[in-house]
């Protein structure tokens, strides 16, 4: 990846992280930890990969993305806002009674949302159906992407969707798993280990790649490998840091579903503003 593209993506990732903090602070609720760990993925997906048009969010020929780990809506909302689907200024209205930005993605109210999600395991199932429709009915070059959490893949429905994707040779389907190692009740290993995730994906008929999900060069390699795979769905295991980018949130399970207070908000925003300034000055 060239330096200019990496700088652009790093800048958007920092802005997405700032939006996550702004929205969860504004809501006094939400899920910052897994949103922050996914911010680099969201930046790459929306600013270097997917064919989407904020001016025409229902374009039939667009690529689709389904946030299967729907509780990490703050990260997706922030990416969509910075892409131009709706005003960035609306992010602090997250979860407010009169806001269209509710705690989980709602395709009926939020421009750019392709599927309403929240019940873990159901997002990947809907995404697999979209991939089959795109491949066998629409028959245009449409790719379907979905993002799951490593805690989410403890759900049995996830693996039923994997079988479906392999059965129908959905090589337009790319599944990312955000492996930050933590879920609401503790570490994934202690709660219910899904390891070995790579071998499970292979056994369910996927081509598989493991990357550093907070590294843009690795993300580029994964997307390139997906585009060069034929006849099989593609799975990417992203090793990430929960709470990435905010020092006191990193690798702390308590930030799975807790909003920052005013002091914490100020510290987090100061860190992210400094990181953004360093990126833009480089």
Image: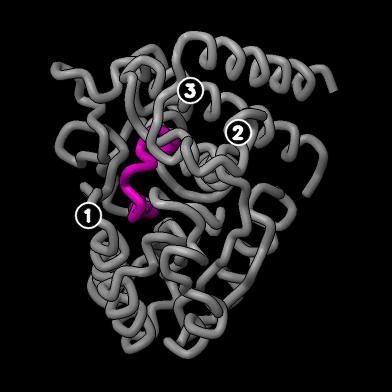
Residue topped by disc 2: 13
User: Any magenta on residue 227?
Assistant: no
**Residue 224 x %, y %:** 64, 65
> What is the quadrant of residue 75 in the picture?
top left
Task: First in sequence, mark 2 or 3: give its number.
Answer: 2
Q: Which mark is residue 271?
A: none
Taking depth in this image into account, of 187 and 38 the one nearest to the observer is 187
Secondary structure of the residue carrying numbered label 3: helix
> Left of 241 or right of it: where is 76?
left
* Inter-mark Cα distance, 1 to 3: 23 Å
Which contiguous range is marked in magenta? Answer: 63-76
* Inter-mark Cα distance, 2 to 3: 13 Å
> What is the quadrant of residue 155 in the picture?
bottom left
Residue topped by disc 3: 21
**Residue 57 x %, y %:** 30, 38
Task: First in sequence, mark 1 or 2: give its number.
Answer: 2
């Amino acid at each position: 990846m060239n330096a200019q593209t990496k700088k652009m993506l790093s800048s958007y990732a920092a802005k997405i992280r700032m939006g996550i903090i702004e929205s969860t602070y504004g809501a006094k609720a939400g899920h910052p930890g897994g949103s922050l760990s996914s911010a680099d993925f969201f930046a790459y997906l929306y600013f270097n990969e997917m064919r989407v048009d904020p001016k025409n969010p229902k374009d039939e020929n667009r690529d689709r993305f389904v946030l299967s780990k729907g509780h990490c809506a703050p990260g997706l909302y922030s990416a969509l806002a910075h892409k131009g689907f709706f005003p960035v200024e609306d992010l602090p209205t997250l979860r407010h009674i009169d806001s269209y930005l509710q705690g989980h993605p709602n395709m009926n109210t939020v421009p750019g949302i392709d599927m309403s999600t929240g019940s873990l395991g159901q997002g990947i199932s809907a995404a697999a159906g979209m991939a089959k429709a795109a491949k066998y009915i629409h028959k245009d070059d449409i790719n379907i992407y979905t993002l799951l959490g490593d805690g989410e893949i403890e759900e049995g429905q996830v693996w039923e969707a994997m079988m479906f994707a392999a059965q129908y040779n959905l090589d337009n389907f790319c599944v990312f798993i955000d492996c930050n190692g933590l879920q609401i009740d503790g570490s994934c290993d202690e709660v219910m280990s899904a390891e070995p995730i790579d071998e499970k994906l292979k056994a369910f008929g996927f081509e598989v790649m493991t990357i550093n999900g907070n590294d843009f060069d690795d993300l580029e390699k994964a997307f390139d490998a997906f585009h060069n795979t034929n006849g099989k769905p593609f799975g990417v295991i992203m090793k990430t840091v929960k709470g990435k980018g905010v020092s006191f949130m990193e690798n702390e399970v308590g930030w799975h579903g807790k909003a920052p207070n005013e002091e914490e908000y100020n510290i987090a925003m100061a860190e992210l503003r400094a990181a953004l300034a360093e990126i833009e000055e480089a």
